[in-house]
Image: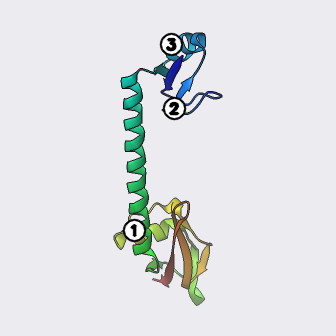
Amino acid sequence: MKVILTADVKGTGKKGDVVEVSDGYGKNFLIKKGLAQAATASNIHEAQQKKEAQAFHKAEEVKALKALAKELDGKTVTVKIKTGENGKVFGSVTPSHVAAALAEAGFDIDKKKIKMDAVKTVGSFSAEVRMMEGVISKITVNVVGL
């Protein structure tokens, strides 16, 4: 019996896959629990259309992220923070500070995507913005005291 999986099933396949299973397993377990549907010609065509649409949207997202990374690469961001004597920072400059400064500059970047060392002094430091696997842009963070 051929079925189209509607969810990931361990040992059988991933969501959207058309797999051949035994009749009892397909009818009594997969279809009954809603993990699969019978593989008719229309269902197979519909699943194929969904896969193609999903691949297209993924490619568009990657293209947009690469464009954003290219635009962001080499930018300099200024972070203002309270300092004490000799330019020593109270606390440290974190990725959330950098994300806020990037938001002011018009870039909506999640703080979890910014990789940098803890900064405890005033000056210029480098940071990486990792959009996704293989899409990285380097920025410069200027820390100035108030």
Q: Nearer the viewer, residue 6 or 121?
A: 6
Distance from the alpha carbon under mark 3 to that under mark 2: 18 Å
* Percent coordinates x, y for residue 103 in the rendering: 38, 68
Point out the tag, 1 or 2, that comes first from the N-terminus. Answer: 2
Point out the tag, 3 or 2, that comes first from the N-terminus. Answer: 2
Query: In the rendered view, would you say 31 is above or below 73?
Result: above
Labels 3, 2: front one: 2
The residue at 41%/35% (across/down) is: 48
Q: Are marks 1 and 3 in contact (CB under 8 Å)?
A: no
Q: Is residue 44 left or right of residue 141?
A: left
Mark carried by residue 67: 1
The residue at 53%/81% (across/down) is: 83
* Percent coordinates x, y for residue 77 in the rendering: 44, 79
Residue bearing the label numbered 2? 17
Labels 1, 2: front one: 2
| Local SS, label 1 | helix
Distance from the alpha carbon under mark 1 to that under mark 3: 45 Å
Quarter of the picture containing the N terminus is top right
Quarter of the picture containing the C terminus is bottom left
Query: In the rendered view, would you say 63 is above or below 51?
Result: below
Residue bearing the label numbered 3? 32
Q: Specify few, some or many for label 1: CA neighbours under 10 Å numbering under 14, 14-19, or 20 or more.
A: few
